[in-house]
Image (tube, rainbow, N blue to C red):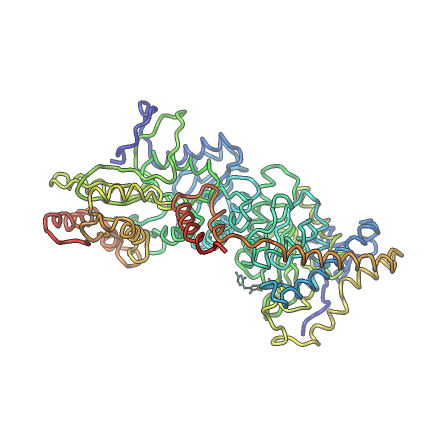
Amino acid sequence: MATAKEPERNEKKTMRTITYREALREAIAEEMRRDERIYILGEDIAGYGGTYGVTKGLIEEFGEKRVKDTPLAEEVIAGAAIGSALGGLRPIAELMTMNFSLLASDQIINSLAKFRYMFGGQAKLPVVIRMPAGGGAQRGAQHSQMLESLYAHIPGLKLVMPATPYDAKGMLKASLRQDDPILFIEHELLYNVKGEVPDLGVHYTVPLDQGIVRREGKDVTIVTFSRMVHICSQAAEDLAKEGIEAEVIDLRAIRPIDLDLVLDSVRKTNRVVIAEEGWKYYGTGQGIAALIYEYAFDWLDAPIAHVTGKDVPMPYSKVLERAALPGKAEVIAAVKALVPARATAGVGAR
Amino acid sequence: MVDTLGARAAHDSHPADPIAAMVNADGLLTAEAERAANISDDVLRDLYRRMAICRRLDQEGLNLQRQGELGLWGPIAGHEAAQVGAAMAMAETDWIFPYYRDFAMTICRGVDPGIAMTWFRGLTHGAWNPYEHRLGPLIISVGTQVPHAVGFAIGCKLDHEPTAVLVGFGEGSTSTGDWHEAMNFAGVFKAPVVFLCENNQWAISVPMREQVAGRVADRAAGYGFPGLRIDGSDVLTVYTVVRAAADRARHGEGPYLVEALTYRFQAHTTSDDPTRYRTDADVEPWRAKDSIARATARLRDRGAFSDDFERAVAAEAEETALAMRATLLSAATPHPGQAFDLVFANPPASLLREQAEFVAELEPGSAE
Ligand SMILES: Cc1ncc(C[n+]2csc(CCOP(=O)(O)OP(=O)(O)O)c2C)c(N)n1
Ligand SMILES: [Mg+2]
C-alpha cells in the first residue's frame, strides 16, 4: 500500500521496490557522490550505521571524514552543522530521534532559522537535519513524539515529512540541492515500508513545496502527512466500499505547505478531515484548519474535523499507546460524521 | 574580593605545552619569549594605534547612545588588548567568530566603523559581509557562536584548508552547555580553534567567583587540550600567545583555550548600572593595568614611542570617530517591506504573497 500512486514520470517504466530506509540511504549516497561538500555527522552513524540503519555502509564508501561519528551532544551537532555550512559545506546532521532535537532546539530556532536573515542574506545555510519521530513502537513518553508543530511555527525553516520511499529519496535529494535549512522528519515506523522507486541510475527529485493527491475523491478531503498518509489511504479504501469517495492529500512537506492543492480539493469536496499523529491543541492540523477557514470558508459545508493523537504524553503500555494514537477507525468515523451531513439542508458553516 | 592578578599561568595538565612556557606566573610574556617572538616595533605600534582608535570609538559609541542615536551600546573599555591583540594575531585567511562585545575585532577585520555601528543603531541584522571580512556577525545569544566556530573549523579540516578559527566569548559564556559541548567536540576532532575567553570578571552583575569554580583555562584539560590564563591587558602577550595558538592549530595540533584576564571598566551595556553591584574600589586596581598605558610603556622601553606618534594616533582616532558618526547618521533606514527579504534563499510563495500584500497596503499611506 506504500505503493500508492506516484506522479507519472517517463522513467517510471524502470521501477523497483525498496524500503524507505534504503531510499534514504540511496539518496544520501548518490548526492555524496555528486557533491563532495556533503558530509554526515551524528551519533552512532558511522560504523554502527545509525540507530535505524539509514547510514549503514556509507562509512565504507565515503570514509570517516565524510561520515562522522560525534560525541553525544545534540546542541553542538546542530551548531557545528551550522558552522560548517557557513564555511561552504553541506552537512546532513542526523539526530537519533526528534525527541532529542529539543536539546538542539536553540541552535535550530535561534541560529539555523535566522542566520541567513541575520547575516544580511550573505550566508547560505544548506543544513539538512534528519530525524525520526513518532510513536507506535512502545518507546514511552519521551521517545515517541511528533514535535514538528514546534518547528513548523518558526519562520526560516522548511519541514519535509515524506510518507513513501519514492518521496523519501526524491525529497532528500532535493534537500541536498538547495540552500535553505531543512528539517527532514522521518517516522520511525516508516523505515521498513516498501514502495516503488526508479532504478538506480535514474535521477529524479521531488519538489519540497508540493503535496500530492494520493487518492482522488469527491465526497471529502482528508489532509494528512507522514505515516498517517498510509492510515488515511487504508481508511479511504474502506470508505469506498461503502460508497464514500475520499480524496487523500499527502502534504509531503508541512512548511511551506502546498495550500493551493488543499484549497482546490476543498472547493471540490466541501468537507475536510485533517489527520495527524501529533497533538491537537495549537498544532499543525489546527494551523491548516485556520488556513482553510481563512481562504475557503465559503466552500465548506461542514466544520472541519480533526483526527489527532490523544492529549496525553505517549503511554508506555501497548494497550494504552494504541488508545492514544489515531488510527483508521477514527479517520473513518470522522469522515462518516461529516459526509451524511451533505444531504441535510442548512447544516454546516455557511 | 576579586583576585586582580592571580594569573599563575603554569599548570600541570599540559606540561609540555610550549605556549604555556611563554608566560610567567603573572601570565605575562617572559623577556625570553618576547625576544624569541621577535615582534617588531612597527607591529607593536600598530597594536597600540588600533587600541587607541577603538577606545575613542567606544567613547563615541557611548556618546551616540546618550544622544539618542543608538538603541544600545556595549562598551569595550578594558577589552582593547584582548580583542586587538587576538584579532591581529590571526592570519588574514583565518576566520573570527565574535561575541557582542568584540567591536574592536570587527574594526581590526577592516569593517568600516560607521557601517559596523549600524547594527547598534538597529538598521540591519548583518552590517558586514562575513565572507569579505572572514568575520561572523556579533552574537548575543550567549555561547551559541562557539559550536559554529568549531563546526566551521571542522569543515576547514575536511577541506584541508590551513585555516584557524578564533572564537570570542566572556567568562559567563563558559557556563553554557553550548560552550562545553563545543569544547568537547573541538578536543575530539582536534578542530583548529583558538578559544578566547575575555574574562572581564563580570557577567552583568554576576562576579567571576559565582560563575566559575576554579579557572576557565583549567577546563581545557578536561577536554584534552591545553588552556592558558594570561594577562589580557597586555596586548603584546595576547598577540604573541594567540598567534602561537593559531599557528599550532593551523599545523593540525588542535584547539587551544586562552583565558585573557581583564576587566570591564564600564557598564555591561548602556542599559546597566554597575553601581548596583560594584564599587569604584573594585575597579581601581584594574585601572592600574590599563592596556594602553601598558603598551605605551612597552614602546617607551623599546625607544619606539614619541610624542609625535602619540599625537598622530590621537588625531587619527578623533578623525575616525567623527567619520564613524557621519557614516552612521547618514545610513539609510530600511523600507518596511524589506522585513520579508532574506529569510530564505528560495522563499515560499506564501511569504512572497504576504510581502506583496504588505507592500501594497503600505504604498498609499507612505506617499509623503
Ligand atoms: C543564552 C543567553 N542567556 C542570557 C543572556 C543575557 N545576557 C547577555 S550578556 C550576559 C552576560 C554574559 O557575560 P560574559 O559571557 O562574561 O560576557 P561579558 O558581557 O562580560 O563580556 C547575559 C546573562 C543572553 N544574551 N543569552
Ligand atoms: Mg564577563
**Front-most of residues B180 and A154:** A154
User: Which residue is at 73% across, 59% downward?
Assistant: B81
Residue B254 visible in this rendered orientation of the protein: no
Question: Looking at the picture, how far across and down is residue B303, in whole percent?
Answer: 89, 57
Where is A28 relative to B344, above or below?
above
Residue A216 occupies quadrant:
top left
- Position in image of residue A238 (x %, y %): 15, 41
* Quarter where residue B207 is shown: bottom right
Q: In the figure, residue B6 lies in which quadrant? A: bottom right
Residue at 14% across, 54% down = A347
Check the image and name the residue furthest to the right.
B303
Q: Residue furthest front?
A: B368
Q: Position of residue B320 (x, y in %)?
A: 73, 56
Relative depth, front residue between B187 and A338? A338
Judging depth in this view, the residue of B136 and A47 nearest the camera is B136
Residue B262 position (above or below residue A49): below
Q: Is residue A28 left or right of residue B140?
A: left
Taking depth in this image into account, of A169 and A341 the one nearest to the observer is A341
Q: In this image, A234 relative to B128: left or right?
A: left
Quarter, ligand 2: bottom right
Q: Quadrant of the N terminus of chain A?
A: top left
Residue B224 seen in render: yes
Residue shown at 55% from the left, 51% from the top: B147
